[in-house]
Amino acid sequence: MAYYNETYSYPDLFLWRDETWEGCENAAAPLFRKLEQLIAAEQQAAPAVDHYADRHDEATDKVNRAAYFPDVLQAWQEKGMYFSSYGMMGEQMAPTAVERHQLYDPRVLLIPYVEANRDDPHSAMNRLAENTELLETAARENILVQFAECKESVSGALMEKAIETQGTFRISYDPLYLDISALVRHGLTLADVPGLDLAAWPEPETLAGRTVVNISDKWQVNLAHQYTIGGIYRRGLPEWDYERHIRSMAGKRQAEGMRLEHDYTDPHDPKMAAFWQEKGIRCEDHYIGHDWYVTLTPESAFTHPGHKLPVLLTLKEPRTACPCTMQTAFQFYYDFIELCGRGEFMMVYFALETPEDNDEVLPSVLEEVLAAYPTDPSRVYITGQSHNGYYALEFYRRHPKLIAAAATLCDPVGLQVGARIDYYLKKAPEIIASFRQYDYPLIDINGQLENSYQKTNRTPEKIDEDVTYFQNRLSAFKLPMRSREEILAAQSSPDYVTRKNGVPADRTEVRYVMGSEAYLSDYRNENGKWYFRYISLENTPHMIMPQMAELSWEFLRRFARNTETGEVIERY
């Protein structure tokens, strides 16, 4: 364990502390807690019936979080309802018009539940069976039905559900209703819910045969996302030296960025004007249809339009249903914003939740930006973190003449083509062949604590998967192939970086950046070009880190692209 001075402090250190965010929850939290209490009591009095007790043929896949019966879902599709349970959205049933993006403003209905047994493989299917009549009505009336676990709905989890749902189905996510039938069954009203500010609540209504209340403005909450993620890893990842991190320069910079979520409500908060003025940045909203994107442009671009700016497409979600999501987006990329303010590039924030939707809208976003601002179309770059990193890479693959280079953050060094989507996983050979048609300069940066390649406790199945994915990366990016034996030998290599990264490389380097070691592995392709770099950061979990900005830009800025031929131009 590295040494640090536990007495070191700085003005924003308090933003890492639990007491700062204690009690920070959405306005519907008291109601969810009451519903949880009532539903749990009902389950204790009369345990739920397993409608599929005699079946053991449930299916699972890499997309859905819940097990399911294909024949049951097929029957529901014939009724016009489509089941999914992936990402933060959880379990939901979408009418055909919503599934096919034909309806922008459907009513959304949350069905609260308490998970009695998390190991029950039939729980999701039982919820459908228990709500058959409601779901049939929802199919006829185009109501999107989502199942919301009470315990997870008091704070940021419900907001994540809403954000991802709006981006996936491209809907307004307004109006949003919460089923409060449990209150009615117990002879209670909203007045019986402790902590509820009744003056701010509307009267209950009836929807799909249920008593509901409109919570369209009750689920949003300003909570620092990095603090939330940090808390999860602090409790569940003992290898992470949390106290060392928050006292590092990286932790200090993250805390400075957290002020954007602590001090301001959303990007339209009048106080934000002073922030942007200090940074020398103009922040502007734009819309393509119902889709919102945000640009950050150095003020110098307007006073010196002869200088053509590079463009950094930043895949992070602005969502109209919850404008405060932009505060999180700004915080995540706080050090990229610093580079933007210094005039290195302009930033464009946009992301939808499928590669197809990004493919449909993002080229139009870029076309508008290139036409409206003094920009260099040969120097358009793209970045994204976690699943947005996969989406950035997929957009890059589909549009090699538009993008000069890419930075994927918090994604593995192995090429897991598809990112949560079985359809793409099955198309790995086709996707790899597509990559090989052009050169794709790429830097991939993640945390060493999330890097499975350096772990010594992998299962045989995980080892096989990691080897395959790394060989996918080598093949797709036209890098010399490494054998299984060479890949596995990396963990015991005499080279320090190779051991730390867990994969062989052509050239390695260690840097010390903002309080942690950065392990750089460079790869030379079959044409002798150094177009792929992988970096893992010491003492870092699955979190975007301040170091990633300078490390990414150092790599990206080397490249431009001939937009006619697709040829990569090495600027130096």
Image (spheres, grey):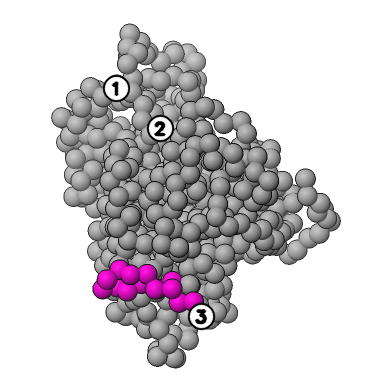
For disc 2, the neighbor class at 10 Å (few under 14, some 14 to 19, many from 20) is: some
Q: Is residue 365 visible?
A: no
Mark 3: amino acid: Gly
Looking at the rendering, the stretch of residues picked out in magenta corresponds to 559-572
Quadrant of residue 75 in the image? top left
Q: Quadrant of the N terminus?
A: top right
Q: Is residue 534 visible?
A: yes
2 and 1 marks in contact (CB < 8 Å): no
Lateral position of residue 78 relative to residue 545, left or right: left
* Residue at left offset 44%, top offset 13%: 47
Query: In terms of sequence position, does the residue under pointer 1 or pointer 3 come before the other?
Result: 1
Element on which disc 3 rests: loop
Residue closest to the eye, 459 or 476: 476
The number of numbered discs placed on residues in the rendered structure image is 3
Q: Which residue is mark 2?
A: 65
Numbered tag placed on residue 69 in the rendering: 1
**Residue 311 picture location, percent across and down:** 41, 73
Residue 50 rendering spot, x and y as whole percentages: 37, 14
